[in-house]
Every structure is written in C-alpha cells, then in structure tokens.
Image: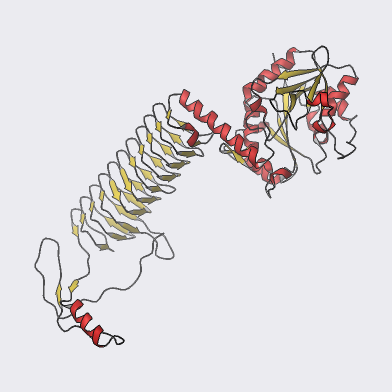
C-alpha cells in the first residue's frame, strides 16, 4: 500500500540550451505544453497536493496551468524560486509548504512529458515496500554519456550518484543512470537539505548530494530501474523536443489503433494527446487531428486533412486536404476535397460541402449542398438547399457583418451574390448570375442581372482604327445591338445604347 504522498515538480530552470525567449516548459510536444504533460500525469496519481516550483517566466507557467483543460483541480499549488540556485535549493524554497504536506515526497522534472502515471505508481509502491529513506528511479542506457551514473553498494543499494564530469573512467563505463526522479521520506529529506553545501564551481545546491548525505548517516537509498528508459527522457534541446514529440505521437497512434481505429502510415499523422477517435474510423496518411478534436465511429478522414478543436459525429467523410477549425459536423455529412470550415461552422446531417467551399460562422441544414467554389459566411442555410457554384454571401459592408438566411428547399443558381442582410424564403429559386439585395418571398423566382450588350463588328472596327491611329483613342462603334436575356426564354430587345452598369464594390471577409 502506498503511503500518503505529495508531488513536487521542478520547473524553475532557464532552459538555456533551448535558445528561446520562451521558457522551455512552455514549448509543446504531442499537442501539449511540456509542463501540462507532467502536471496531468501527477494529477492521475491523486496525491494530496501537487507543487510546481517556478522561476523563469513563472507568471506564464502559472497562467498555462490555471486554464482549462488542465485537470489539476484544487490540488495544484506553486512555489517560487526567485533565483536559480539548483535543484536542492528549489526544494528548500518550498520547505514551509512541503515538509508537513505528506510522509512521502515524489520529485521529478517538468520536462519529462513521456513519463506515465502507471510507472510512477509502481515506483511509489516499490518505495513504500522498501525500508529505504529514499528511492531513485534509474535507467540502463546504451549510451549514458551526459548522465549522472548510479554507483551501487554491495547490497545493491545506491551508494552514490556521480556526475559525468566528475566520474572516473571506471564510473563512466557504468550504464545505469540517474533519471532525476526521486521518492523521499519527507522529514529526512529536509534534514539533509539543511546540510547541503554549494558546488565549488557553480555555486548551486544539488539534490543528488542528498543521496551521499543519507549514506553518510547510514540511511539506505534504493534504486528502481524503469522498464522503458525512454519514459524518463528529459527535454533539454529542440532536437530532444522533436524526439519527444515523435514518441508521444507514435504512442497516441498506437493507442488508437489498439482501440479499433485504422491508421494508414501512422508515422505520417499528427494526433494530439487530447484527441478522441471512434472505432472503425479510417485515417489516411498526412492527417493532423489537433487540440480537443472528437471524431465519431465509422468516419473516413482523407489524406492531408487538418482538423482542430472540432466535433465530427459518426459516419462523417472528410476528403483530401480539407482544413476544419472549431466546427461541428453531423452524422453522414461529407466535406471536401479542399474545403475550409472556419470557426463556428455547423454542417447538418447528410449535408455536402464540396470543392473549394469556405464556410464561416454559418449553419448548414440537413441534406443541403454547396458543392463548388462558394463562400458562406454569417449565414443560416435550411434543409435541402442547393447552393450553386460560385455563390457568395456578401456579409461585410466595410464596418459590420450581416446575416444571410436561406430557408428550406431553396435553389440558388450559380454565380449568385447574396448581399446581406437578406432572406430567401422557402422553396424559392434564384436565377444564376443574380445579385440579390432584397428579400425573396417563398415560392418566388428572383432574377437580378444587368443588361447584356453585344457590340457588332467591334473587333474589326477596333483593328482598323488601331492600324490608322495607333496612339489615339478608338472612336465608338456606330451600331450597337443589345440583347437583354430574361428567364423563361424571352426574346431580345433592340436598344440604342447599353444600359449603364452599377458601380461599387461588395466586400467579403
């Protein structure tokens, strides 16, 4: 049985090897900030309290961990280390909070995103069953270069932790290394922390020296070899960040595949840690599922689609190269290819959003279709609506956004501009090429086109005049024949001049 314990996460370092203006723990791997990974892992263990020791960019780290979706609840507290003076000094800074919090203190670094809660639980059980004053999680590495070596005593306890730069040739040959993860008897730890002296070179107080001090007092220190050394990997450089990201995403893909999701070429996909995917969904190569995306069962996500913070119901098809953000897609809907759903787009059941269609802050009703080259912004589209190719909702007048409402069973002809605010009633038709500026009553046909003018022999006359007077402006052609085409096949009307075209611009955003 595990004794009551508290967790201290070391997160005050500068992270200078990252060469970044941003604190190392605020960089992301696998879809979460590094510090988010470790705090979530700590929360799963249900300790009495979790203390994060912060220093560099403390405000930003605290804000990150205080906002959803980090599930820390009321267990999370912060300790400030105003000056970085080593890991031993970091725990000293929290003496008032830590010393009486619980009999055991579990300590690990904030830059260990691969560490699993189950591994830490086994480590705590190991320590609780031992008679040790402290336990160290160790790992056997093929190449231990750069790590502190574990020097064992004849009884297999930890005699000493020797840093690389201080190790003898014999000690450097040791492949068992210190992961920086410890479990201490809290009372004994703080006794020894008071005895720590600063390093002669750096002036810092190192937690590893506590192991040596406990041995001096005849206290036993146990070693717990971690089954998978990759879990204890610390992220100290951008190269290691990329490595951790790849491992986290491979872990997530494997988890989904074992739960019944088909992923072709899993090494090519990017699936964040908080993403959920239902069974029998197929994910093609190059897909990115990001943030808090939820994908239902029996969906098909085509190659190179990017979906972020969105909800997809069952039986949804997302075709190649779509971009979907903060949107909801109902059961049986089809998106793409090359469609763009911007925030607050809602697509109803069996609806179809097709090639190069953009939807923003709009609701598309059940069974409605916008198959080609269309922009629907700030719109409400009813059920069984057909939106023709090239349709635009002109929602922005330069100052404000306005709504377009298209009711059920409407047919919108190709190349239509709907100048908001405007409403098209049930069962209405809008002729192709129309610019609709007024409401369309139910069951009506709306046509709004400029007159077409045909200037006969215009090309020949232009060529003649250009050859005679290449630098002068061309004279107007005498004969003009204009034909106004109206819906229903009406005959043309002969006019003296072309009807003037309305000037002005319709903006959309």
Image height check: is 49 above or below 442?
Answer: above
Position of residue 353 measured from the top left corner of the image (x, y, whole percent): 32, 45
Front in this rendered view, residue 508 or 160:
160
Q: Quadrant of residue 383?
A: top left
Image height check: is 356 above or below 90?
Answer: below
Q: Residue at x 75, y 30 (%)?
A: 147
Position of residue 306 measured from the top left corner of the image (x, y, whole percent): 45, 42
Q: Residue furthest front?
A: 169
Q: Residue at x 37, y 33 (%)?
A: 299
Q: Residue at x 73, y 12 (%)?
A: 129
Q: Residue at x 35, y 45 (%)?
A: 337
The N terminus lies in which quarter of the figure? top right
Front in this rendered view, residue 223 or 189:
223
The C terminus lies in which quarter of the figure? bottom left
Q: Count the labels in the image.
A: 0
Front in this rendered view, residue 235 or 23:
235
Q: Quadrant of residue 157?
A: top right
Front in this rendered view, residue 98 or 215:
215
Q: Is residue 181 visible?
A: no
Looking at the image, residue 254 sits to the left or right of residue 145; the answer is left
Colouring chosen for the image of the structure: secondary structure
Q: Residue furthest left?
A: 491
Q: Quadrant of residue 399?
A: bottom left
Position of residue 36 measured from the top left corner of the image (x, y, whole percent): 63, 36
Position of residue 429 measured from the top left corner of the image (x, y, whole percent): 20, 54
Looking at the image, residue 36 sits to the left or right of residue 374; the answer is right
Looking at the image, residue 235 sits to the left or right of residue 355; the answer is right
Q: Is residue 240 visible?
A: yes
């Amino acid at each position: 049985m595990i004794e009551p314990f508290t967790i201290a996460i070391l997160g005050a370092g500068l992270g200078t090897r990252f060469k970044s203006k941003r604190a190392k723990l605020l960089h992301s791997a696998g879809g979460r900030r590094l510090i988010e990974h470790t705090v979530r892992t700590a929360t799963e263990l249900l300790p009495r309290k979790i203390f994060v020791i912060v220093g560099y960019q403390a405000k930003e780290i605290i804000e990150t961990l205080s906002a959803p979706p980090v599930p820390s609840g009321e267990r999370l507290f912060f300790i400030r280390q105003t000056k970085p003076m080593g890991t031993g000094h970091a725990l000293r800074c929290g003496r008032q909070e830590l010393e009486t919090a619980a009999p055991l203190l579990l300590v690990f670094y904030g830059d260990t995103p691969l560490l699993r809660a189950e591994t830490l639980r086994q480590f705590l059980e190991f320590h609780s069953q031992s008679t040790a004053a402290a336990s160290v999680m160790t790992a056997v590495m093929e190449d231990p270069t750069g790590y502190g070596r574990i020097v064992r005593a004849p009884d297999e306890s930890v005699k000493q932790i020797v840093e690389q730069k201080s190790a003898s040739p014999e000690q450097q040959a040791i492949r068992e290394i210190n992961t920086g993860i410890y479990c201490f008897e809290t009372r004994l730890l703080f006794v020894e922390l008071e005895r720590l002296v600063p390093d002669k070179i750096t002036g810092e107080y190192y937690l590893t020296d506590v192991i040596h001090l406990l041995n001096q007092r005849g206290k036993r220190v146990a070693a717990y070899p971690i089954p998978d050394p990759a879990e204890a990997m610390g992220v100290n450089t951008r190269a290691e960040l990329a490595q951790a990201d790849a491992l986290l995403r491979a872990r997530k893909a494997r988890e989904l595949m074992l739960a019944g999701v088909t992923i072709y070429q899993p090494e090519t996909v990017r699936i964040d840690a908080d993403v959920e995917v239902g069974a029998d969904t197929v994910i093609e190569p190059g897909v990115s599922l990001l943030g808090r995306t939820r994908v239902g069962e029996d969906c098909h996500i085509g190659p190179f689609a990017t979906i972020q913070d969105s909800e997809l119901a069952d039986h949804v098809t997302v075709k190649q190269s779509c971009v979907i953000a903060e949107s909801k897609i109902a059961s049986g809907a089809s998106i793409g290819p090359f469609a763009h759903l911007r925030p607050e787009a809602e697509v109803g059941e069996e609806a179809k959003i097709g090639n190069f269609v953009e939807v923003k802050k709009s609701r598309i009703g059940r069974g409605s279709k916008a198959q080609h080259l269309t922009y629907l912004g700030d719109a409400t589209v009813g059920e069984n609506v057909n939106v023709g190719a090239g349709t635009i909702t002109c929602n922005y007048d330069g100052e404000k956004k306005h709504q377009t409402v298209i009711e059920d069973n409407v047919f919108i002809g190709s190349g239509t501009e709907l100048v908001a605010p405007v409403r098209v009633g049930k069962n209405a038709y809008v002729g192709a090429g129309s610019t609709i500026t007024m409401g369309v009553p139910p069951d009506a046909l709306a046509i709004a086109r400029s007159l077409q003018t045909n200037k006969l022999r215009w090309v020949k006359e232009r060529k003649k005049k250009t050859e005679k007077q290449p630098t002068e402006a061309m004279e107007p052609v005498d004969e003009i024949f204009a034909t106004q085409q109206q819906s229903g096949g009406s005959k043309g009307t002969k006019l003296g001049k072309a009807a003037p075209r309305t000037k002005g611009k319709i903006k959309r955003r």
